[in-house]
Amino acid sequence: MSKVNGAPQKRLLQVLNGQEGDQTPVWLMRQAGRYLPEYREVRKQAGSFLNLCYTPELAEEVTLQPIRRYGFDAAILFSDILVVPDGLGQTVGFKEGEGPVLEPIADLAGLEKLDLARVLEHLEPVYETVRRLAKSLPDETTFIGFAGAPWTVATYMVGGRGSPDQGAAKAWAYRAPDEFQKLIDLLVEATILHLSAQVEAGVEVLQIFDTWAGSLPESAFRRFAIEPMKKIVAALKVRYPFVPIIGFPRGAGPMIVDYVRETGIQAVSLDTGLSPSWVRKEVQPLICVQGNLDPLLLVAGGEEMRNGARFILETLGDRPFIFNLGHGIVPQTPPEHVAELVEFVRDFKR
Ligand code: CP3
């Protein structure tokens, strides 16, 4: 590891600040989770998933687990994007094998029940987790905080659960865009509060997940994905000009170029569907990129996984780049394959 004045350098922060490093930094979305036996153990102890998110010593422990095993260059806070609706006062639960279940909000009367004023207090255990991790993480590990983007969080709040087409949120957004905009505006404010509190508590980088951005046609993408992100980034930049922000507009396709140009982010996370060769020409000249190995190649492991990783590193690795997956690790991933992948990225010579 390179050192300046005896202090270990954080590889991920260096790349985000435009400095050349000696090695490509690597971390993986959903690096904490059910594929790890030690996570399943703590998860059982916690009872419910939200209880795990709101118990600082347990959330700290599961954040550290993948760092101990693999020495990733970054730790991502263990939490969920749906703590924000929970903080706003919507009833949120997680059902075994089903995922999130929320009491759906589908009209202005539903919006009336949400209260921005209770977010910070309700999410205090999350910020306590951040304060603990800021002390317990290794010196060379960059600490990432996160939130969901307003559109993606709204799809769960309106639909009441995950859905293949985000139909319920779209129905409201298309039928009464100015009403739906009120929910988006509220989420912009809640997201700014939540991310600011994470920075105050000690995270060094922020990632904003817009998992369902790709389901929006162009004009709705501009209104409900780009515009809210612009407002969030601008507000955070006023308060914390040196905290880099990574955007993840999953499924945006070629709209990712406008997303990068217009939102003010410092890096963009690429989903599995984006071609590295296209990204090299159209996106990487504009911004640092992160990605984008297919998480299912990590399940397969072996030569196919290494070929996939090699192509990405050969295509994108010589300009500001962070190695990651194109979406989160899936539960059936063998932990040994993660170790093999990290070793491959670390040994790769550009
Ligand atoms: O390691 C990390 O990446 C940090 C923790 C993290 C979780 N969720 C933990 C989690 C992060 C960054 C998220 C983000 C998240 N949550 C997103 C955006 C990224 C993406 O994957 O698209 C979304 C859409 C959610 C909402 C969510 N949370 C869903 C749809 C589900 C159910 C599906 C599933 O994987 O179970 C969750 C639950 C969840 N969030 C789990 C974990 C580890 C599994 C729950 C469990 O352990 O019982």
Image (cartoon, grey):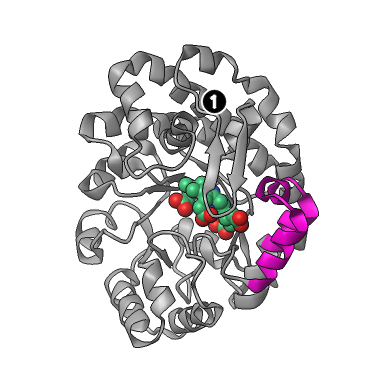
Question: For the point 35% across and 67% down, which residue is it?
Answer: 294
Instruction: Looking at the picture, tell me which residue is in the foreground, 312 or 340.
Output: 340
Membership of 54 in magenta stretch: yes
Snapshot quadrant of residue 174: top left
Number of callouts: 1
Label 1 sits on what residue type? Glu
Q: Position of residue 78 (x, y in %)?
A: 64, 54
The crowding category of the residue bearing disc 1, from other C-alpha atoms within 10 Å (few below 14, some 14 to 19, many at least 20), is some
User: What residue do we see at 40% from left, 20% from top?
Assistant: 181
Q: Quadrant of the C terminus?
A: bottom left
Mark 1, secondary structure of its residue: helix
Q: Which residue is mark 1?
A: 189
The image position of residue 212, as x and y in percent, is 37, 43
Q: Residue at x 53, y 48 (%)?
A: 99
Q: Nearer the viewer, residue 6 or 274?
A: 274
The quadrant of the picture occupied by the N terminus is: bottom right
Residue 264: image x %, image y %? 39, 39
> Is the CB of the residue bearing disc 1 within 8 angstroms of ligand 1?
no
Residue range (magenta)? 37-62
In the rendered view, tell whether residue 103 sits above or below residue 311.
above
Q: Is residue 149 above or below residue 75?
A: above
For this view, does 240 lie left or right of residue 107? Answer: right
Magenta span contains residue 299:
no
Residue at image location 64% in from the left, 76% down from the top: 69
Q: Looking at the picture, how far across and down is residue 327, in whole percent? A: 41, 59
Which image quarter: residue 44?
Answer: bottom right
Q: Is residue 144 visible?
A: no
